[in-house]
Image (cartoon, grey):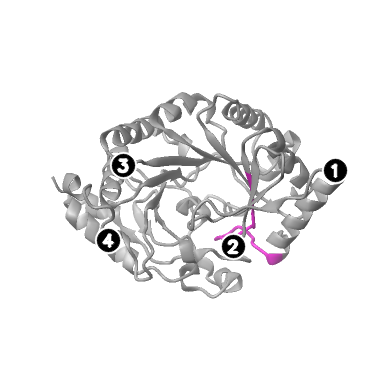
Amino acid sequence: GWYGERLVKDIDPALIDSFGRKHRYLRLSLTDKCNLRCQYCSPEEGEEAKMPTTDGVILTGEEISRLTRIFVGLGVRKIRLTGGEPTIRGDFGQIVRDLGALRRETPHDLSYGITTNGVRLLKYLPDLADAGLVNINLSLDTLVAAKFPLLVRREKKWHDRVMKALYQMLEEESPFKVKINCVLLRGVNEDELGQFVDLIEKYDVEVRFLEFMPFDGNAWSANRMVPQAEIVEGIQRHLASRGAPQAKRLPPDSINDVANLWGVPGFKGRIGIIASMTDAFCGGCNRLRVTAHGEMRNCLFGEEGWSLRDRLREEACDKAMAQVIAEGVKAKHAKLGGKRDMHELKERGAFALGMMSLGG
């Protein structure tokens, strides 16, 4: 059928926006629920506001499977599962197995990843490896178990489960490629910068420091954000205090790379800094997002969505689905969802979906 014919061409015009950007990367949110309540992601008060989803609102496993096939047919080559916390879905194992089947039946080289807090990761590692879902981004803001409850408002012993999964993935013969995402908050975990940097000495891991971003209800304020320049300064100061060589800038892996990369001579891993607030990287954007409710968003900061779920449930054919996708892609702004800077983003207020719904 139509899907098979599409595989001949490299990318469908549906995935190319008015700035010529080719959207080969799909970020798929499996749920808007999470089992942690991190300060920078969730509102502190009335914290359940964005969370409840009644049955039938979120995409089913079958719908996810069909959508991924449609997107791959159009030219998507990279899929990342996000959330909320993707591993809390009851059918998570089945979704992973479906992706494995898709990988085996398509001639293209597909790259699969997941962004997870790692709490439920350990038991799924064999399934993930089997499906070729090996690019693991672990959200981990502290290496100190005692700080875990303060940061995520959950019990300390969960931290041990995360660390156990992390070290298993970092073993020599492991198939996984691991990135640790650490959101730095002033006065909370910036004192751990050095401990995070030390991980890259012995392990082939990328430790990424993220600037804290404004999202609905997360009490964003510029003075809680540790900006890129200060992060770099902190890294160099730590390395100097250890008598280690200074970190040096590395070239990006690709033009779509969001992290500014740094390496330390003699160290196995590397450091990435994601400066979405002070140094936006919109020009090379190749990402599309689908929320857990089946709404396509063309930008993390965009305010418009296109419902793929409703069209699927109206039994639209693949061609009709491609038209909806094309419409969303064509409407994409040049940068920051059409906003000028981080302060204007903050003013958007209630339009912004919480990070939970959008999946970062």
What kind of element bears circle 4? helix
Q: Residues within 10 Å of mark 2 (few under 14, many from 20)?
A: many
Horizontal and vertical percent for residue 22? 36, 60
Check disc 4 and report the residue beneath it. 14
Q: Residues within 10 Å of mark 1 (few under 14, many from 20)?
A: few
- Give the CA distance from mark 1 to mark 4: 52 Å
Residue type for callout 1 = Gly
> Tag on residue 108?
3
Range covered by the magenta-colored residues: 207-222
Residue at 34% of width from left, 43% of height from top? 55
Q: Are marks 3 and 2 in contact (CB under 8 Å)?
A: no
Residue at 49% of width from left, 45% of height from top? 84
Sequence-first tag of 2 and 1: 2
- Give the CA distance from mark 3 to mark 2: 37 Å
Foreground: disc 4 or disc 3: 3
Foreground: disc 1 or disc 4: 1
- Give the CA distance from mark 4 to mark 3: 18 Å
Q: Residues within 10 Å of mark 4 (few under 14, many from 20)?
A: many
Sequence-first tag of 3 and 2: 3
> In terms of depth relative to the viewer, which is nearer, 154 or 335?
335
Residue type for callout 2 = Pro
Foreground: disc 3 or disc 2: 3
Is residue 289 in view?
yes
Residue at 62% of width from left, 38% of height from top? 205
Sequence-first tag of 4 and 3: 4
> In terms of depth relative to the viewer, which is nearer, 99 or 263?
263
What kind of element bears circle 2? loop
Check disc 1 and report the residue beneath it. 243
What kind of element bears circle 3? loop
